[in-house]
Amino acid sequence: VQLQTKIAAKRATGAFRLIDSLKRHGVQHIFGYPGGAILPIYDELYRAEAEGDIQHILVRHEQGASHAADGYARATGRVGVCFGTSGPGATNLVTGIATAHMDSIPMVIITGQVARPAIGTDAFQDSDIFGITLPIVKHSYVVREPGDMARIVAEAFHIASTGRPGPVLIDVPKDVGLEEFDYIPVNPGEVSLPGYRPTVKGNVRQINQAIKLIEEAERPLMYVGGGAISATAHAEIAELAELFQIPVTTTLMGKGSFDEKHPLSVGMLGMHGTAYANFAVSECDFLIAVGARFDDRVTGKLDEFGSRAKVIHIDIDPAEVGKNRTPEVPIVGDVRQVLIHLLRRCREIGDVGNDNQTQSWLERINRWPEDYPLVVPSYSDSLSPQEVIAELGKMAPDGYYTTDVGQHQMWAAQFLKNGPRQWISSAGLGTMGYGIPSAMGAKVALERSQVICIAGDASVQMNIQELGTIAQYGINVKTVIINNGWQGMVRQWQQAFYGERYSASNMEIGMPDFEMLARSYGVKGMVVKSRDELHQALAEMLAYDGPVLMDVHVTKDENCYPMVAPGRSNAQMIGLPERRQLEKAVELIYCSNCGAKNVASNNFCPECGTKL
């Protein structure tokens, strides 16, 4: 072994070790911005790029780098990588790190640092990024010795991508990047972390207990979160739902884990979820939580969330199980592996599955979409945001969609029907400015796929400088701005809960001409102001071979409904039509494509997006 080590070792700088280790872990793209402390690493990166091994994407702000790496990871399931220098370069990454941490996204963040003797001396651009980010990373390192670099990189990728995924920080002092040392590569899978052993397989006894409770349930509901996306468990979720005829609702993070066109789907639940999903969770007698964490935007008033239900909670993170709601059956393990085991056990037992036990429950649920549909409003003098998003979803049904945060995000979640990993949105942190850079990252990863960002006129301005990155690299992202001249969700809350005192929420004064701004960056700009222009403009945008920024002017005071008000239960939604009024006053028409019932005022079917 010693002889082999001597033969394998060679002299190399810490920067070489870092770049070589990244290549060994399959890294093809890095999003970053250089600076003094990280220049040794960029000098080595220059050589790697010249050899065609790695492509570096130069962002215009470090926050854009972190969101791009995040979008790359969400779209592919692979670890996203970003670079930033010391001081402000590192602190500019913090919002993106926190975004990834809240949504459990695998990332490796590499920051430059001042030389080891200068750390903690208030030297130029000396900041303790290790300490600053401790609450928002899964793990972090400061590389004190060049000889540790390969091991640390291998550990970082392993930690970021296994168990509950998350961001891992590697802080590299400048002199570590320059110092030479004997280099022995560490390849993926060659790390040993005795203290880090995530539980993958569920407990057999608890799985058997879960099956027994599922068989007894008359009003079951599956509540599926982002953990199902991370685990690639969509096929197993569908199989379990169909076996026992269980309706399925998803969180904002869980969109795509279950086909929303499936008869058992009730769509998204929570603050702006469908009425039928929120009614279902309020009336169910059995709740299967799959990779979800019972967060406040989903549960509303927690003690009334599924208050009649027994709960199974499946999650890979034992800290989440029982944190907000104590389950009757806790199962810690990888969501997909647990469901595979549970389904295999069902086949072994035999004679399990639905025998019309849930039929009356499904019939009740199926009436709610007719009574309380998601409505696409149509106004004579303006476009509604919902019809823009519904038409876009119809024209690009297989697209990968990113969003910023606000009303447009919730409308997109309501009306788009996404496949696994095709919904990319900041959920836990609610980060404005996330949309364009995350779309950029997704498109770099998936060059042949259509990637579309749905943005708000307020959110988009927070990282609009990334149009420069998009233009430089020809990243073919389509961005649609739902422009109502407001911070829309802030305005809605001010209207509903703050006596219509619209403090600092109007964005019209000082708003740029987005079409001209896009052109100034070298990106195609478009403007849509009427319904007559919409379809043709969207078709032109989608067909254009290059990036596009489309500014769509919509009605200014549209609110996002239904809505669960703060402190209320999910069954107490505002913005729903009264059932009797709906039955008497609304003419129902059938969609020619999918047959779904629609109110006559709809321009587009919310179920399939077909123009009515």
Image (spheres, grey):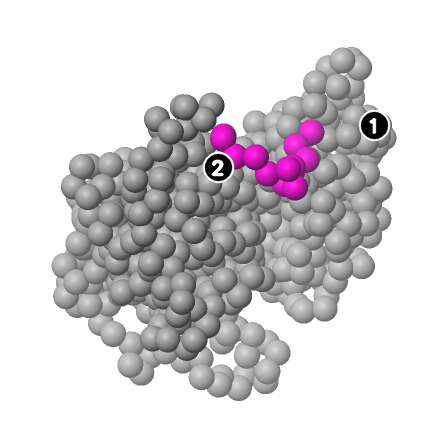
User: Is the residue 495 above or below the residue 49 in the image?
Assistant: below
Badge 2 amino acid: Pro
- Calculate the distance from the C-alpha at mark 1 to the C-alpha at mark 2: 31 Å
Q: Which residue is mark 2?
A: 420
Residue at 59 percent of width and 38 percent of height: 193
Q: Is residue 231 visible?
A: no
Dividing the picture into quarters, in which one does residue 458 lie? bottom left
- Determine the secondary structure under disc 1: helix
Residue at 63 percent of width and 51 percent of height: 269
Q: Which residue is mark 1?
A: 205
Whether residue 197 appears in magenta in the rendering, the answer is: yes
Q: Nearer the viewer, residue 586 or 594?
A: 594
- Dots 1 and 2: beta carbons under 8 Å? no
Rendered location of residue 491, percent (x, y) = 49, 76
Rendered location of residue 5, percent (x, y) = 41, 28
Q: Classify mark 2: residues with Cα within 10 Å, few (<14), some (14-19) or many (20+).
A: many
Q: Nearer the viewer, residue 44 or 474?
A: 44
User: Is the residue 256 above or below the residue 403 in the image?
Assistant: above
Residue at 44 percent of width and 80 percent of height: 505
Badge 1 amino acid: Arg
Dividing the picture into quarters, in which one does residue 215 lie? top right
Please provide the residue range marked out in magenta. Answer: 189-201
Give the prevailing secondary structure in the magenta stretch: loop
Whether residue 603 sits left or right of residue 239 in the image: it is: left
Q: Is residue 147 visible?
A: yes
Whether residue 243 sits left or right of residue 118 in the image: it is: right
Work out whether mark 1 precedes mark 2 in sequence or the reverse, and give the earlier one: 1
Dividing the picture into quarters, in which one does residue 610 lie? top left
Question: Can you tell which mark lies on residue 472?
Answer: none
Rendered location of residue 592, percent (x, y) = 44, 36
Whether residue 310 sits left or right of residue 373 in the image: it is: right
Rendered location of residue 122, percent (x, y) = 41, 77
